[in-house]
Amino acid sequence: EPEVTQTPSHQVTQMGQEVILRCVPISNHLYFYWYRQILGQKVEFLVSFYNNEISEKSEIFDDQFSVERPDGSNFTLKIRSTKLEDSAMYFCASSNRGRSYEQYFGPGTRLTVT
Amino acid sequence: AQKITQTQPGMFVQEKEAVTLDCTYDTSDQSYGLFWYKQPSSGEMIFLIYQGSYDEQNATEGRYSLNFQKARKSANLVISASQLGDSAMYFCAMRDLGRNNFNKFYFGSGTKLNVKP
């Protein structure tokens, strides 16, 4: 069964450093998303991406964040200058056209900013 | 503003019994989708069930059913015959199918379900 994959599973970085989180969505999916979940808290929408551009973003997704689909298979989230409060689990998800637009989530990348 | 409310931070249920997890939502849109996801302690998000706002019948997927009451804006998840493996965090979510916020999902704060043997 096809699945969304994410690398790395855990990333530790120092405050102020840039990080790139990688995702490989399901191959025939058209819509891609990033979410974050601070430990013990709810899942928060960051951004959705369709047709090579951002279709929606939340207020969390400020100028420090960017997304890219560099090669038709990967979908990346870049945080330019990490802050302590960026420490969270980051989930990538993808979906296809269909009645439910059901999203398939990746296993997540745990980002720890020290 | 759209909002999902899950009022039960934690629930206990005896194995083999049924349990209802509450979810209410707030939207002014006529067209939307409602989802439930399960998050076990391992952290992954697992899709459980979907209900469209125009669906006339309540959605069912195996032991999961969604008690959709549109006038009350509630979309409660019912798990029948609970199993120990059902112990997890459960999130209710909504997707707006209208023109604005077309591709944005809103999640509730979650309910932690513990199934007792």
Image: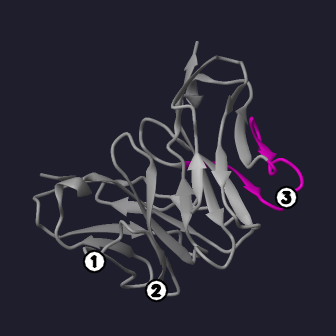
Residue B55's disc is: 3
What amino acid is found at the position of numbered circle 3 in the picture?
Asp
Are the residues at dot 2 and dot 3 in contact (C-beta closer than 8 Å)?
Answer: no
- Looking at the image, which is closer to me, A57 or B40? A57
Are the residues at dot 2 and dot 1 in contact (C-beta closer than 8 Å)?
Answer: no
What amino acid is found at the position of numbered circle 1 in the picture?
Asp
Q: Is residue A114 above or below residue A52?
A: above
Task: State whether residue A2 appears in this view.
Answer: no
- Looking at the image, which residue is at 72% across and 45% down? B75
Q: In the rendered view of the protein, which quadrant contains the N terminus of chain A? A: bottom right
Tell me the magenta residue range: B46-71
- Looking at the image, which residue is at 83% across and 47% down? B58
- Looking at the image, which residue is at 33% across and 71% down? A77
Which residue is under mark 2?
A: A53
Q: Position of residue B17 (x, y in %)?
A: 72, 19
Separation of disc 3 and disc 1 at Cα?
39 Å
Separation of disc 2 and disc 1 at Cα?
15 Å
What amino acid is found at the position of numbered circle 2 in the picture?
Glu
